[in-house]
Image (cartoon, helix red, strand yellow):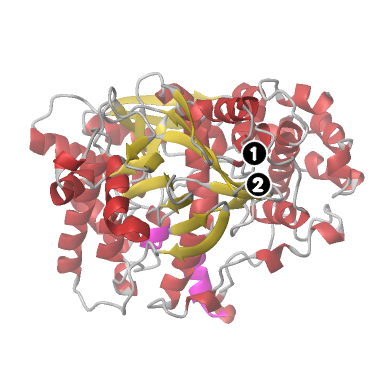
Amino acid sequence: MCGIGGIVYKPGAAPRDDATLDRFASALAHRGPNGIRIERLVRADLIHTRLSIIDLEGGDQPIHAGSAAMIANGEIYNDPDMRAEIGNDHYTTGSDCESALRLWQRDKTAFALRLRGMYAIAIYDSDQNSLVLARDPFGIKPLYISELPDGIAFASEPATLIAAGLVPPGIDPVKRSELLQLQFTTGSPTIFPGISRILPGETLHIKSGCITHRTRQSALPSGPVEQIDERAALTRLDAAIMDSVRVHERADVPFGLFLSGGIDSSTVLAAMSRLRREAGQGARLLTWTATFDTSNVANESEQAAHLAQSTGAIHEIVRIKREDFWRHLPAIAGCMDDPVADYAIVPTWLLARRARESATVVLSGEGGDELFAGYGRYRRALRPWWRGGRKMRRKGIFDGLDVLRPDHSAHWRNSLTTTERDLTHIPTRLSAFQAIDMAEWLPNDLLLKLDRCLMDHGLEGRTPLLDPAIANATWRLPDTLRIRDGKGKYLLRRWLERELPNADPFAPKKGFTVPVGEWIAQESSRLGPLMARQPFIAAIADPASVRTLFANASVRKAAPAAWTLLFYALWHRVHLEGMDRTKDVFEILSA
């Protein structure tokens, strides 16, 4: 896992100076604490910061092949298969990412079709002055670009392009409204004008500093619903889960698991435990769970500890206090340069900080709800209106609160890029709802949160439930194997019931909630006036309404809005005003 960046220049353009590249590399350094490399070519500059996972001694990048140089962020899980197919004598390192370069040599722009893994890859051919940028189909690893007057710049994080001085700081008001109403932003444009995401599965072809064309592969297999019974589906799912977890464990460094106690992470725990039993391994698995210093929110930390104990794992419960929230929230907002106001960033960041003391790689259960139809919003969307059915995300967080000014609350829906109408090729309506989340919510909220919160501590996150083997085994299953008796993830629950009965997968879900509303309410008399006086908050919201919102932060509807506005304020102060993210919340807002 690493940070990548670079600039490819148009003909005749003067290269950027060393100071620009030094700022660029310094801003990426947290993603690769094991080494920084800047390589200056005739018409391009490449930057790589390395977190060593595989081939610790010999896997430095760029990796060269003739006139081509590759830098990559990610893991290629089918690297052993590719080496056997291509011939190991063609390789010069033990890095799993080298397979991407060897496939490019053979297949050129179609190289990414053969990759299994999470990745953001840049391959520059100096003879052709051409650049290929590719991102994995699920969007696990991020990649951003900016079209400049003198060429194309790309990076693992948009903040690095701003820190290097390549793009001025700024804000897109439509994307800001989308952030406030959805807690994340969608599509290709980011909240920073002039910086775009490369979409999941997208490959960009750049010639002489200009984009010539784009191609895109889907993470989801095509075709109609399969006719398969439950027993056969379970057998196939078992093979897919075990295969995926096996390859996701491949590392030359210590690794562990974020264990929430829910179905998804418990599934990964069951598979990891089984692999150890089958291999006769004596090493005990490391697991971590977050809990909070309050009894007013549901959490599954006791269940997680029980499951970890039953598998012999070395388990740690990380207790998060309200003091941690106020002390570290600016740093957490600061790592989310592409902003995500999902309150789960708080425990994720704090868990990552603790896990980094013992491990370099952590597996987690992201993707299970999307791929196996776990969310209640899918079931609600399938019901007719007269039975309580409603569309997904039909309302924004601030709708009905009269806090945002009208021109900052009404237009966010127009920017949503993936709708049910765009997915007529999907086998069922349920699949369409899942595919919408796979296209937008998953890469732009959950996976972005995981990437930034872990990489802020130099920790790699892996998501074995988001793998082609599992998608191919499950995506075209009948709806009855996804939802049954009012519960989602039916087939996955059946598998977990067999493999780890203590998980009790058919029991009512307790859920996982971060008590941000309670914490904010406890400081509302101090926090409300501070928020209301921020000029950038007053520009989008009525100050009196802001004070009222924070005074009512313990109320169910007001709590997520108050949290989102607080996150936005801290994000704005750090990323647009350059405030020191190591200060606490009140220092940031009082400055």
Residue 174 lies in the magenta-colored region: no
Residue drawn 63% across the image and 54% down it: 185
Q: Amino acid at mark 1?
A: Ala
Is 135 on the left-hand or right-hand side of 160?
left
Q: Which residue is mark 1?
A: 14
Q: Which secondary structure lies at badge 1?
A: loop
Determine the CA span between mark 1 and mark 2.
Answer: 8 Å
Question: Would you say the magenta stretch is mainly helix, strand or loop?
Answer: helix
Front residue of 334 and 180 = 334
What is the count of numbered marks? Answer: 2
The residue carrying pointer 1 sits among few (fewer than 14), some (14 to 19) or many (20 or more) residues within 10 Å by Cα, namely few
Q: Is residue 274 visible?
A: no
Mark closer to the observer (1, 2)? 1
The relative height of residue 428 versus residue 336 in the rendered view (above or below) is: below
Magenta range: 370-384
The relative height of residue 540 versus residue 529 in the rendered view (above or below) is: below
Q: Which residue is mark 2?
A: 150
Q: Which secondary structure lies at badge 2?
A: loop
Residue 383 lies in the magenta-colored region: yes
Q: Quadrant of the N terminus?
A: top left
Residue drawn 74% across the image and 55% down it: 177
Front residue of 408 and 404 = 408
Q: Quadrant of the C terminus?
A: top right
